[in-house]
Every structure is written in structure tokens, then in C-alpha cells.
Amino acid sequence: MNPESEVHMPSESSETDREIIQCRDVHKWFGSFHVLRGVNLTLCKGEVVVICGPSGSGKSTFIRTINRLEEHQKGTIVVDGIELTHDLRNIHAVQREIGMVFQQFNLFPHLKVIDNVTLAPIWVRRWPKDRALKIAEELLKRVGIPEQAQKYPGQLSGGQQQRLAIARALAMQPKIMLFDEPTSALDPEMIKEVLDVMVELARSGITMIVVTHEMGFAKQVADRIYFFDDGSIVEHNTPEEFFRNPREERTKKFLSQILTH
Amino acid sequence: MSDQAEVKKPPRVEVGVLGWLKKNLFSPWYNTLLTVVSVGFVVFFGRVILLWAFHSARWEVVTTNLKVFMIGRYPAAEAWRVLVSLGVVALLAGLTWAFRKAKDSPVRRWLVLAWIVSFPVIGILLRGFGEDNPFLPKVSAEVWSGLLLTLVLAIVGIVASFPLGVLLALGRRSRLPVVKVLCTIYIEAIRGVPLISVLFMSQLMLPLFLPPQIRLATVMRALTGITLFSAAYTAENIRGGLAAVPIGQYEAAQAVGLNKALMMILVILPQALRNVIPAIVGQFISLFKDTTLVVIVGLLELLGIAKAVTGQRQFIGLHQEVYFFVALLFFICCYLMSHASRRLEKALGVGER
Amino acid sequence: MRTPGSETSKVPFWRDIRVLRILAQIVFLMVVVAGILWAISNYRQRGLIFSYSFLEKEASFDLAEGIQFSPTDSYARAFLVGVINTIRVAVAGIVLATLLGLITGIARLSRNWLVSKIATVYIEIIRNTPLLVQLFFLYFAVIMKLPRLSEAVVMPGPAYLSNRGIVAPWPRLAETFNLWWPFLVAAAAAAVVLIIIRRRSQQRIGRPSIRAVWVFACLVLIPVAGWLVVPGNPLWLDVPELIIKSGGVLKVEGGVNFSSEFIALLLGLVIYTGAYIAEVVRAGIQSVAKGQTEAARAQGFTSGQITRLIVLPQALRVIIPPLISQYLNLTKNSSLAIAIGFLDLYAVSQTMLNQSGRVVEVFFMIMGSYLAISLTISLIMNIVNKRMQIVER
């Protein structure tokens, strides 16, 4: 059960220096249910990765192990050189460097829009209030809701709320952004505005892992698509190859179900 | 058009006063019977009560003892201190009401500070210093009685039991088994026994477990009992509020980098407490009524003073008048508080969120 | 924090989550235990001991209320008397308060404006006044003002109402009761059998195959038949009599005596808890959506059937949990007995305490008794609650 050491060979290519997430043989059990069965995934800086798969396949659980909202029981996860173990310091460090956008938004309802964004920078990064405010205002502009700053999240539409959630996650200037089915809880007419923001983010060079069913988005900006089923990665490829030549039977089945939309 | 129906007025018996009477009092036949019986009931008891109240009741026992009811054995010469304290509280309450909508005003911060400071200030004002002090001679807490003592017990009780209740609620929800079990045992044990036994414990038992040098005033002991008791019930209310906070809030707070403590203080508790304000007010009203129980351990709050008054030579046996007056006072206070609480609930529910 | 690929062999324990969890609990436990030990040491410092041996000693005080007791009986027996008194008042209180609460709750929802208003006024007055004030009023201002025994109000029975309480006729067991009680058992057994048959047939064919009348008939006719069969009368009526003893002292002999303290406490508890139960009942009935009654009426159900088959079962599910709370409250409130002189378990404990001086031991006895009673009531009611859930699925 010893975590395997990742020995750095100085002679290794510069690829490994740009690797920002390394997941090796990650297993997780919920009681006796084996939800993650030996997941291997590597991500380089600036890459955008889309994870898709049928519900119950474990894909949400997997990205939540990356920022320790779930604890993995076997295997190693290394984020930006920090290994996720039982070390409190590591866990907090990792959580600071990863931003997450949830399916249910999970905005803080008792705080104004602007305060939602400035909360963490002020209290976790210890920035002075005006610096945090400036960054927050820029972010609200970036996601397209600058005029909502003094309102409360409950007064915003679904699309605006999710964009606010993106701004909140970006406020900590994270190295990696995780998206857990960000548009699944939105009315259809609001999906586009959120996806537009995500496309802009991807094009600006932010490292992203997105769990989604939105294949249009994947085709547009994903560097790679991973197909998740039954707790492990069945196949992964570039978007073009993935859609044109799916290799596995399960992938073909899934694609046929999803693309006849 | 010729075949437009003629617009008629409804029959007289269906509308207006007659209509209301018919619908509410007489419509099916058995309602008529009930109405008759009820009217008889009301008339009978009404006569008895009114005859007593205005004819045979001797209200002098209340009017001559009004001051005693209010401040008990507090020296009359120092009564101005009680009035000043009341004035301070009224002022702060008025200011809080006036500024309830202005969320960003700096006045609110000063108000919170003012409330916190008011407690020790009023305490000192009421208690005073040494016996020779010319301005504020000592009025030991043992002497406080009447409505004054009721208010002191209730207000200090609810304020002191609140932080303890929060800790207990968090403890009971903790994932650490030891903490959870101990908090649960405390809460369930206190809730399973009557207040009187907790008062008994704090009155008689507590001093035995303290070092022989420490001697607690009777009022302090009663306050301890009330606080420990109320904290258990407050904890259950807060626990309900905590359970109503969606788990996504915990996750979002963690995902954004907040540690456990910051998460609780900045995100979870504000939402939880907002949910349970009506329940907390309800708890305060209960506590207010429960202060009467300290009569049994020998403290003379409003009810105790009332009982003592009936022992006065010229007023022996005038129980009805005295207890009626006490009941009336409590009724007015509690009814007003319930009413305010209901309006508060509405205001919170229809809020901006 | 860049540790490029270094071996994370040992996480220092002060940062390891698993260790911290256990450490926190150990520290917490140590603090609590330390506190307890400190308290105990203070106790010992005062020269006090902890022992229950006093329970066997003679009480040397008398108890005017409850089962047979004399000053030569032990403290333990005195405590038992108190516990039985508490149970007496609690059981009677629960039954009566439920009745009163049911009637008042339904009255509150009546379409008759006057009836509904009277119920509302009663509920609001009672809920906004402390129980102790009500008890004082009832005891000192009402019961104590009743006439003396010599001028007692005579009620049919005859029963005598005075400021000492009520003395009423009471059935007592006669010799032939031994021959009669098997009939009572048989009646109960037959009723249970009929109820089971009714329930089974209800599930099979949708309506009970035996009418409810027959269950009541069993409970009434079988004991009556037994009474006629058995020689003499298995029960005789103990009728109270006013007797003038030597020295001109008036006494009542016979019948059963409900002391004025008992009546005051019972009345106070019933009136107080009844108001709260009324609110619970009202909330329960109102929780059944109006659409239910409307749909049922459209189907042709009579009012009585609607109440019985549709409103009541659903309302009961909402009513029972808070009802349990109210029962527990009533039991705990019975401790106010000491304020008016009724010898419940708390009052007896106080006397025991004053006589024996054993504060801590008596305290644990008090707490233990109330916890036991509360737990019993909770358990019984939770079984009832569960049955309500199952029957509906």
C-alpha cells in the first residue's frame, strides 16, 4: 500500500516538466462498491480534457478525488508536484490551486455576487480588500455579469449563476479548473452563454478538466476526450479521432446514444 | 341584446351581516345547536368572571404592591437604576429596529458593539459597588426580585445558552465519535429530565463539586441551571438549521480553499442560524415562562413575589387577584413576542434571497 | 511546495489527517475526564461520601399520598411511592389531555365561527401563560376555595367535593372475583381475535368481514354473562360515607379519595398540555391537502367515511411525532407537583434529601427515573408511529 514514488530522471523529456496532474492506478470504494478501478490519467499544463461517459460510471467521483472532495484509497494522485496523501498541508495546498465549478452551482446565498467572488481571496490568500475587489470586478466582466455585482445569487438566472460560479473559482487564480457537468442543470437557452465563457477560458490557456455531455464544446476546444465507463477509462483520443473512429464497442454504443440528439 | 339575463341582487339572507351569521353560525342544523350551547357557555363564564373582576375582587392587593411586583426587594431609592437600564435597552432596541434594513451602514457595527457592552454595564449599574459608595451602593444579586429578576434570568439565560448551544450542535454533528457521543449524551440527558431537576442540580449539587473556597450566589446557580438546560434545546434547534444547509455549500467552501473553521464561520453558520431564528425566539419565549420555576428553589421572581404578597397581613388569601395579574403580565409579554416572531418569520421568508 | 517527485514516505503526524482525528478525540476525552476528576476531588475534600446504603434505613417521615406507607418503611419504599404517584398523574394526564386536545383541535377547525373562536381563545391564553402560574391559580385560587368537608358539595354517587379533594364511589374486588376474571380475559382475547380477522379480511377483500359492532359486543356481553353465571357479585361498590368520629371530627370513610393536590395538578397538566395537543392536531388535519377531501366527496364518500378513511390516517402520521413530545413534556411538567404539595417522585426526593442529606445519590435517582419514564413513553409511541407508517404503505 505504499504510494509509489515518482522518481524524476533529469534526462527525461520536458514533457514531464509540464505535467500538472498525474493519476496512477487510482482506486476507490464506496463501502463494497468499487467505483474507481485503476484510473490512469496525465494532464499537461494548458491542456483541455473532456471526460464523458454514462451516468454512474464514476467520472464525477474521479474528478472530485483530484481536489480531495473524495478520498482515493489506492494509487497516487500528484497535482502540480504535490502528492495527495493524508497530509493536511498537501491537501490544503492542492485545494488552493484547483478551482471547481459544480453542477448545482453551490453559490453562497447569503453573500452578494461580488462577495461570493472575493471571499476566498481575502480569507485564504490574504489579499487586501481592494486588490480582491479589483480582481473580482475584472472577473465579473470577463464572464459577462459586471452589472450584477451588488445583487444576491438568488436574483440571477441559472446561466448567470453558473458564470458567477466560474468567476468565483477563477478568483483564486488556480492552476487547474475542474468542471463537474456545469451545464446539466441549466435550461437549454442558457447553456450557450456558459459554454461560451468556458471556450474563452480554454482558448486563454487555462488547464481544464470538464465532465460533460456537450460534445459540441468538446469538438471545439478539447485536446483530448476520455471515455469513462464502469470506473475506468475505456479509451481516449483527440476529438476528431474519437468521434470518427471509436475503437471500443462500449464507446461506439455510448456515442450512438448521445449523438442521435 | 334581448336575451341577456337579467342581473339580480342576491337574496338578503346570503350577504352582508346576515349572510355571515348564517354561514358561520347557523348553516347546518347542528351548527345552530353548537352556537346556542357556545353562547350559553360564554355568557355563563363571562358573567362569573366579570362579576368577580369588577365586584368582589380586591384589586388593591395589586395596585398597592405594583412596585414590589416590578422590582421586588430592590431598594426603592435605587429604583432609578432599573429605569435607566430599561431605557438603555429600549434605546438599543429602537436603534436596531430603525437600522434593520441598512445592511452596509457602519452604525450596525457600533450597534453590535453597544449590545455586547450593554450587558456588563447594566450588570454593574444594577449591582453597584461597595456599601459605602455614594453613587451606586451595592445591591447584591440576592435582593433582585420580581419582574426584574425574571427579565435578568431570561435574557442572560438565552444569551449565555446560545454559544454553548452552537458548540453542542456542532459537536453532535461531528464525525469524531468521541465528541459526537459525549455531546449527544449531554443533550439527550438534559432533554429527558424536567427543568426543576436541573435547577436542583445547579442549586444543591453544583456547589458540592466546586472547591470549598468558591461560593456562588443563588442567582448565579439558578442562571447556571437555566443556561445548561436551555443550551440543550437551543442545540437541537441549531442542529436542525445545520442539517438544512445543503451539502454543496460544504463542498464549494472546501473547493475554494477554506479550511474547516473558516468554512463554518463564513459560510455554514450564517446560513444555519438564519434558518433557525424563529425557533430561537420560540425558545426564548419558553425560557421566559420557565423562569417561574425558580420559585421552587427559593428565588423570588415575579411569581414568587406574587405568592409572597398573598402572605401580607392585610392581603391574606387574595390568590385570585394576584395570580390573575401575573398571568395577565405574562400573557401580554408572550403574546407580543409570539406576534413579533411571526412577523419576523414572514420578513425573513420573503427576503431578497 | 514543489517537491518534484520526491518520496512522500512519512507524513509528519501533526499534519496527518488520520492522526489528528484520533488526537483530537483523545484530547477532548482527557479534558472531560480531567474535569470530572477535579469535581470529584472537590467533593471528597468536603468530606462527603457516595453510597446508596441509606436506602434501607427508616424514612421517619410520612407520605400522605399514594400507596400504603408508614414512617417505619424504608427510603427505598418512599421513593417507590413517589414514582407510582408520578406514573398515576402522568398516565391519567396523557389520556385526558389527548381527549381534550383532540376535541379542541377539531373545534378550532370548525366552520362554526363561535366554536372556533372559543377554542382559539382557550389555546392562546393557555400557551402564553406559564404552567406554574396556572397551577398556582388552580390550586390556591380554585381548589382551596372549595367548601370545607362539613359543607361539601354532594354529587351523584354520592361523591363529595371539598377543599380536601373528591371522594367518590369506587368498585372493589369481592371474593367471587377469582371466578370472574377469566371472563374478562376471554372477552379481551375474543376481541383481539375479531380485530385480527377484521384486519386480514380488510386487506384481502377491501372491507372488514365482521362489523365493528361485534368487537364491542364481545367486550361487553362476555363479562356480563360471566357476572350472571358467577354466584354473588364479583365487584362491590365502595360508597363513601361522612362519619362523625369521637371528638366531633368529621371524616369520610370508604370510596376512593382523589386529593385536592392530585386534582389540581391533573387539571393543570391536562388543560395546559391539551392546548398544545390541540395545535398539533390542528396542524395534522390541515396537513392533509384539501384536494383529498374534495376528491373523496366527488367519489361519493360520506363525511364520516372521509374523516375515518382518508383524513384521519394521513393526519395521524403527521400528528404522532409531536404528540410524543407533548406526552414527554407532560411527564416532565408533573415535577411541578412539589410547588403545590403533591408527593410525586421529585417531591418525595426532596424530603428524602432533607432527611438523609444524600444529595448526589438522590439526584441520580431522580434523573434516572425521569429518563426511564421518558424512554418508555418514547419507545411505546415509536412502535405506534411505526405501525402508522406500515399500514399505509
Image (spheres, rainbow, N blue to C red):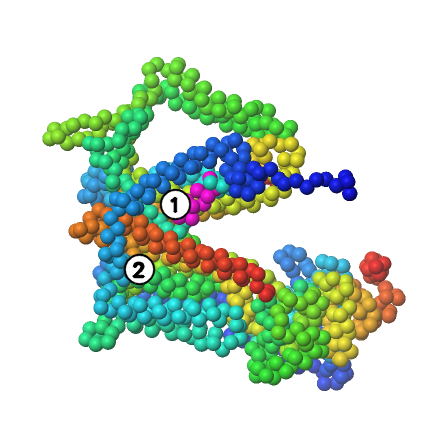
* Residue designated by label 1: C272
Q: In this view of the protein, can residue A82 be seen by the observer?
A: no
| Chain of the residue where label 1 is placed in the rendered structure | C
Label drawn at residue B147: 2
Q: Which residues are magenta?
A: C115-126
* Residue at x-position 12% and y-position 30%: C248
Q: Position of residue C237 (x, y in %)?
A: 30, 23
Between marks 2 and 1, how big is the CA–CA gap? Answer: 23 Å
Q: Is residue A245 above or below residue C227?
A: below
The C terminus of chain C: image quadrant: top right
> In this rendering, do the residues under marks 2 and 1 share a single chain?
no
Identify the image quadrant of residue B185: bottom left
- In the foreground, B5 or A171: B5
- In the foreground, C304 or C218: C304
Mark 2 is on which residue type? Leu
- In the foreground, C4 or B83: B83
Does B3 lie within the magenta span?
no
Residue B111 appears left or right of B74: right
Q: In this view of the protein, can residue C104 be seen by the observer?
A: yes
* Residue at x-position 60% and y-position 68%: A108
| Chain of the residue where label 2 is placed in the rendered structure | B
Residue C333 appears left or right of C285: left
At label 1, counting other C-alpha atoms closer than 10 Å, the crowd grade (few under 14, some 14-19, many 20 or more) is many
